[in-house]
């Protein structure tokens, strides 16, 4: 009578170990039903689910594995599995899978406990855990660390909305980001990434910087803050703020452009997206003048932003149609996806303001980046703890995959 046995092997990892174990199994005519292997800090954890035939060679295979394990200084454990349990396990295949991604400056046991407890609470089973971030020295400054742990989970969440709400609550409490997304075919097959500019690709709101130069900084900043939080209509607030810039000398534009700082991780993100064959775009309610500078610096393919009208060396304060507002951003994302021959599921959108929400909603991966609470709650995913290159982790990208 055939046997089904789970073989677990643990010990110090060494070259040739897998070949040695499977060689013994091969001599016994064994069928492999499942296999998995992980190495953590040079310690191996190796599991093989096998079907052992009722033959002379098969009868001695477990004893031979035990001897081989002893020879290789490995601990070996055998667990019999009934055919009923095996058939039940087979029947579970095809269930939905999701990816839970934990992003933080430094990974703690408390963070992992919170994520694993919530997944269990909502009926999801963790199949695999992997570290995507690189190895960090112990003395890494608190604000320079990068930690990312990816959980592959199986099952259907009992209440997806409540699950996401609980993840968001815990993320705020523990100062981490927790992303929850379906592990679909499109997750690793995205090819277009679009970005807001102000407070996303750069650390400032350009219109606020222009307003400071025009002597109306406080007034414009207040309007900007309320517009980004979703308290004001973007089109109306944009026209109101732009009108306050009337008469600003065009000479200050280059000075402001030179002072703008890229957001942490922007250069890494765009270099890797370009290497991976992505098309990239700026879809901004800011100004083309500054977006073009970023395009040249980061190698961005497309730019859509607002024109800053200048007559006789002075800003007119008049808005030039079409204004790139919330709906225009979403429409442009659709147009670019169509132009590139892509489905919306193959797109990424990143932004921080309420006027970014429509494009974040229709993108395959919509990320609220260092956003206001309303935007974080409404977006599919959010990153607040790491830089822009944290987006790569949501694609399953490992630090060791990079070439920078």
Image: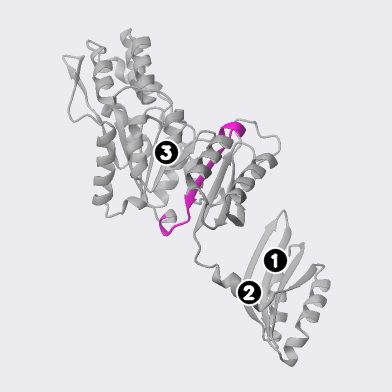
Q: Residue furthest bottom?
A: 56
For label 3, the residue is 379
Residue 257, x across and y down, in percent: 35, 23
Give the distance between the C-alpha atoms of the residues marked 2 and 1, in whole angstroms: 19 Å
20 displayed left or right of 295: right
For label 1, the residue is 46
Residue 385, x across and y down, in percent: 54, 34
Asked whether residue 175 is drawn in magenta, I would say: yes
Q: Quadrant of residue 70?
A: bottom right
Give the distance between the C-alpha atoms of the residues marked 3 and 2, in whole angstroms: 40 Å
Q: Which mark is residue 86?
A: 2
Magenta-highlighted residues: 172-186
Q: How is the image coloured?
A: one colour
Q: Which mark is residue 233?
A: none
Return the residue nearer the eye: 97 or 142. Answer: 97
For the residue labelled by badge 3, is the local secondary structure a helix, a strand or a loop? loop
Do the residues bearing badges 3 and 2 touch, measured as CB atoms within 8 Å? no
Give the distance between the C-alpha atoms of the residues marked 3 and 1, in whole angstroms: 39 Å
Do the residues bearing badges 2 and 1 touch, measured as CB atoms within 8 Å? no
Say if 122 sits above or below 1 in the image.
above
Mark 2, other Cα within 10 Å: few <14 / some 14–19 / many ≥20: few
Q: Quadrant of residue 245?
A: top left
Sequence order check, earlier mark of 2 and 1: 1
Return the residue nearer the eye: 359 or 265. Answer: 359
Q: Residue furthest top?
A: 215
Say if 60 sits above or below 207 in the image.
below
């Amino acid at each position: 009578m055939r046997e089904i046995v789970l073989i677990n092997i643990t010990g110090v990892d060494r070259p040739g170990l897998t070949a040695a174990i499977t060689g013994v199994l091969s001599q016994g005519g064994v069928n492999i039903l499942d296999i998995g292997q992980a190495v953590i800090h040079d310690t191996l954890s190796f599991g093989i689910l096998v079907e052992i035939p009722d033959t002379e060679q098969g009868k001695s295979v477990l004893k031979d594995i035990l001897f081989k394990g002893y020879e290789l200084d490995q601990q070996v454990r055998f667990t019999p599995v009934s055919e009923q349990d095996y058939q039940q396990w087979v029947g579970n295949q095809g269930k939905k899978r999701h990816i839970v991604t934990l992003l933080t400056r430094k990974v703690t046991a408390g963070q992992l406990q919170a994520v694993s407890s919530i997944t269990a609470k909502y009926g999801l089973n963790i199949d695999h855990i992997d570290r995507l971030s690189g190895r960090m020295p112990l003395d890494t400054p608190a604000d320079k660390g990068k930690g990312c742990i990816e959980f592959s989970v199986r099952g259907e969440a009992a209440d997806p909305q409540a699950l996401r709400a609980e993840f968001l609550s815990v993320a705020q409490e523990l100062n981490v980001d927790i992303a929850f997304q379906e592990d679909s075919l499109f997750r690793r097959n995205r090819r277009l990434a679009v970005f807001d500019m102000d407070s996303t690709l750069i650390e400032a709101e350009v219109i606020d910087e222009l307003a400071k130069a025009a002597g109306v900084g406080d007034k414009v900043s207040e309007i900007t803050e309320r517009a980004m939080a979703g308290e004001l209509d973007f089109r109306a607030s944009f026209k109101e703020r732009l009108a306050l810039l009337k008469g600003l000398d065009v000479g200050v534009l280059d000075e402001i452009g030179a002072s703008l700082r890229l957001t942490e991780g922007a250069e890494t993100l765009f270099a890797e997206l370009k290497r991976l064959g992505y098309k990239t775009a700026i879809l901004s309610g800011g100004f083309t003048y500054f977006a073009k500078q970023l395009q040249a610096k980061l190698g961005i393919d497309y730019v859509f932003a607002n024109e800053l009208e200048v007559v006789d060396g002075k800003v007119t304060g008049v808005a030039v149609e079409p204004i790139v507002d919330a709906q225009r951003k979403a429409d442009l994302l659709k147009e670019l996806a169509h132009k590139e021959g892509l489905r919306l599921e193959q797109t990424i959108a990143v932004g921080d303001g309420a006027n970014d929400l429509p494009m974040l909603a229709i993108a395959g991966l919509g990320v609220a980046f260092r956003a206001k609470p309303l935007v974080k709650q409404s977006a599919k995913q959010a990153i607040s703890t790491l830089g822009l290159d944290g987006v790569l982790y949501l694609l399953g990208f490992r630090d060791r995959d990079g070439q920078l």
